[in-house]
């Protein structure tokens, strides 16, 4: 019988979807696991919610119950229906990434989870039932350094000899405008560098994106500050490892995977003080975090300095890869989550034994 159900009830491939997709293949080798909802790349074929309920109607062998691992409000609601209305023998684990104060409904839902896993200490603050802080991890086999970065960049077809990228939705919260302003300062000094905005603009943000493009053209940089749009997930690792730097400057990020994916690819970052960026940077050895007060000027200065000092950049690239492998691998994340599952199961066995005695 199924030990773990992982839900994915959003048809769009979001950051949350990406988190689950990275983990599920590893967890499927550890547990009898079912994906419920919409498909995810590289993961087992999903089952319906009705089928997930059927698969967990009876506890799996040697387990007092199955575990449903959820990551969204609608997934918490679906799991609560299965546990509390249908009375299925399950426990619910929720991953909490947000550091802001949630509204009333998600707070109510989180209060009814059996366990919460926070991705950073700030995401655990003032939340109930937190069992562990388990940072998101990166698959260091998929995201790895290029053997020859110059050749890898040439293979992308983009102009110039080096690349700098910002990855994420084109919108204000992601700081796309801050990246553009930073590049307007940097690119005139480094004529071999091309800057890429890698992300989709939603319909409500397209006029804003057009304004950013117009700024690049007005500065004479329209051919080197490019907006290729959303890149297919399977093409992203090769493109990122071809870059020399990533420059994530969001105004808010609950955690932030793009610096980690770059680090695993041997690509350091210059980023804003949000999410877990300061932890990733490791005191400036794997990345540089600039403060909000003078962010664009300071980011531009940091990028300029790194691009102008190839030996320093290469040393930071090596350190970034080392840090990703040693502290931020997907295997480390899976082990942390698995430990929470095992704790819940052991508590269930102990409760059963007390009742039996």
Image (spheres, helix red, strand yellow):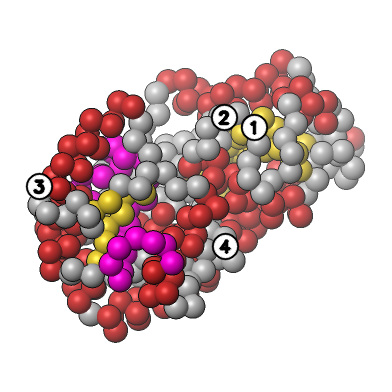
Hey, which quadrant is residue 17 in on the image? top right
Residue in view at x 48 percent, y 72 percent: 145
Viewer-closest of 61 and 126: 61
Q: Earlier in the sequence, mark 4 or mark 2?
A: 2
Q: Which residues are magenta?
A: 155-179
**Residue 276 percent location from the top left of the image:** 38, 54
Q: Residue furthest top?
A: 85
Q: Are marks 1 and 4 in contact (CB under 8 Å)?
A: no
Q: Position of residue 137 (x, y in %)?
A: 53, 57
User: CA–CA distance between discs 1 and 3?
Assistant: 43 Å
The reply to whether residue 137 is in sight is yes
Q: Which mark is residue 218?
A: 3
- 246 is within the stretch colored magenta: no
Image quarter hosting the C terminus: top right
Residue designated by label 1? 38
- Residue 132 position, x and y percent, is 55, 49
Q: Which residue is mark 2?
A: 11
Residue 263: quadrant of the picture: bottom left
Q: CA separation, marks 4 and 3?
A: 38 Å
- The residue sitting at 27% across, 80% down in the picture is 310
Q: Position of residue 41 (x, y in %)?
A: 63, 45
């Amino acid at each position: 019988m199924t030990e773990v159900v992982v839900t994915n009830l959003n048809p769009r491939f979001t950051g949350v979807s990406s988190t689950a997709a990275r983990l599920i293949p590893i967890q499927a080798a550890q547990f009898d696991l079912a994906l419920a909802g919409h498909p995810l790349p590289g993961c087992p074929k999903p089952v319906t919610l009705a089928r997930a309920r059927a698969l967990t109607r009876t506890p799996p062998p040697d387990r007092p119950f199955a575990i449903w691992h959820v990551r969204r409000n609608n997934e918490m609601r679906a799991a609560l229906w299965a546990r509390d209305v249908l009375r299925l023998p399950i426990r619910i684990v929720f991953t909490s990434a947000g550091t802001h104060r949630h509204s009333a409904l998600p707070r109510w839902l989180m209060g009814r989870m059996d366990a919460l896993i926070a991705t950073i200490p700030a995401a655990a603050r003032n939340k109930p039932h937190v069992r562990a802080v388990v940072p998101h991890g990166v698959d260091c086999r998929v995201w790895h350094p290029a053997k020859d970065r110059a050749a890898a960049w040439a293979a992308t077809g983009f102009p110039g000899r080096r690349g700098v990228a910002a990855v994420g939705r084109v919108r204000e919260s992601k700081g796309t405008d801050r990246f553009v302003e930073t590049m307007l300062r940097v690119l005139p000094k480094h004529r071999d560098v091309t800057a890429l905005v890698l992300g989709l603009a939603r319909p409500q943000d397209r006029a804003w994106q057009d304004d950013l493009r117009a700024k690049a053209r007005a500065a004479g940089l329209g051919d080197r500050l490019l907006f290729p749009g959303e890149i297919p997930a399977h093409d992203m690792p090769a493109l990122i490892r071809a870059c020399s730097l990533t420059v994530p400057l969001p105004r808010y990020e609950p955690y932030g995977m793009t610096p980690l994916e770059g680090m695993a690819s041997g690509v350091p970052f210059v980023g804003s003080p949000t999410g877990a960026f300061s932890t990733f940077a490791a005191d400036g050895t794997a990345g540089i975090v600039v403060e909000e007060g003078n962010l664009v000027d300071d980011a531009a200065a940091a990028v300029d300095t790194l691009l102008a000092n190839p030996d320093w950049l290469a040393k930071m690239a090596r350190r970034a890869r080392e840090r990703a492998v040693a502290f931020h691998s997907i295997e480390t994340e899976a082990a942390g989550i698995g430990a929470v599952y095992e704790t819940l199961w052991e508590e269930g066995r102990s409760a059963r034994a007390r009742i039996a005695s």
